[in-house]
Amino acid sequence: MNHVDLNCDLGESFGAYQIGLDKDILAFVTSANIACGFHAGDPSVMRKTVAMAAEKGVQIGAHPGLPDLAGFGRRNMAITPQEAYDLVVYQIGALFGFLKAEGIKMQHVKPHGALYNMAAKSRELADAIAQAVYNTDSELILFGLAGSELVRAGERAGLKTAHEVFADRTYQEDGTLTPRTQGDALIHDDDEAVSQVIRMVKEGKVRSRQGTDVNLKADTVCIHGDGAHALQFAKKIRKELEQADITIKAFST
């Protein structure tokens, strides 16, 4: 039987700004990537999100991003590998403190946004991030874009890795995600998104925007929690994956 982890980026509210429906989304996912204060989130939001995820039995991971609150961490920055290492260690440590206070173990680390996409292509950045994760806790799982430099870097560092695929994003023929700056980057039709995920999990393939099939591995599926129909989609994808005989469970279980 096929099985897959269902993850969501959460804890992205900060201060007076409310983003996403975290409490409701947690009922349908098995892993939560919690923002660590650089691209989104703040200490109070981190604490509350950790508690909500723990209550639902959802596995927790750090979601470190670039220090770009205004750009939500989605704008590339010219950082060095050493800077990437430092900001990842810093943000894992911030979330680890809240997990330690609750007596909870961290499952994984998944970089956010531009940092994630930059590391998917750059071996130097990927190696720095993987080493940061390994040096912080060698038992952590590194989530990275399926088939990317980031996953390969995790394997070189001696980490467990999870190949991640996206429900609502389109793909290029080299296996990368279509940049958000392009009009066809997002899939807006829920049925199309679900069909894409089922094929990725069952067949290990996705149709690129160029019309070719790309081979990939699907260990964990990312759904986004900040869209207008995020909760509706979370319910739908969980139900339809299970109806397609795909077991939903956290990567570490």
Image (cartoon, helix red, strand yellow):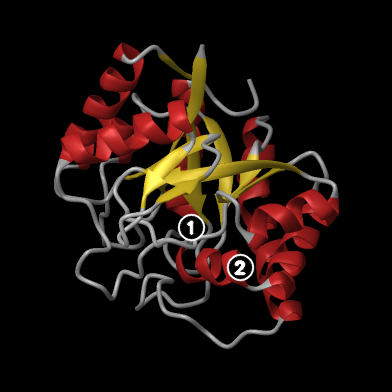
Image point (59%, 29%), residue name: 251
Task: Tell me the kind of residue under disc 2.
Answer: Ala
Per the model, the C-alpha gap separating discs 1 and 2 is 14 Å
Quadrant including the C terminus: top right
One can see residue 86 in this view? no
Identify the residue at the far bottom of this view.
Answer: 78
Image point (37%, 70%), residue name: 72
7 to 133, vertically: above or below: above
Q: In the figure, is residue 164 to the left or right of 122?
A: left
Residue 192 point in image, percent of width and height: 20, 39
**Within 10 angstroms of label 1, few (less than 14), some, or many (20 or more) residues?**
many
Nearest to the observer: residue 11 or residue 225:
225
Nearest to the observer: residue 101 or residue 181:
181
* Residue, disc 1: 175
Mark with earlier residue (1, 2) = 2
Q: In the figure, is residue 248 to the left or right of 86?
A: left
Identify the residue at the far front of this view.
Answer: 212
**Within 10 angstroms of label 2, few (less than 14), some, or many (20 or more) residues?**
many
Q: Which mark is residue 53?
A: none
- Quick one: SS at disc 1? loop
Q: In the figure, is residue 39 to the left or right of 131?
A: left
Q: In the figure, residue 69 lies in which quadrant?
A: bottom left
Q: In the figure, is residue 82 to the left or right of 50?
A: right
Residue 244 point in image, percent of width and height: 33, 15
Residue 235 point in image, percent of width and height: 24, 26
One can see residue 98 in this view? yes
* Residue, disc 2: 119
Q: In the figure, residue 160 lies in which quadrant?
A: top right
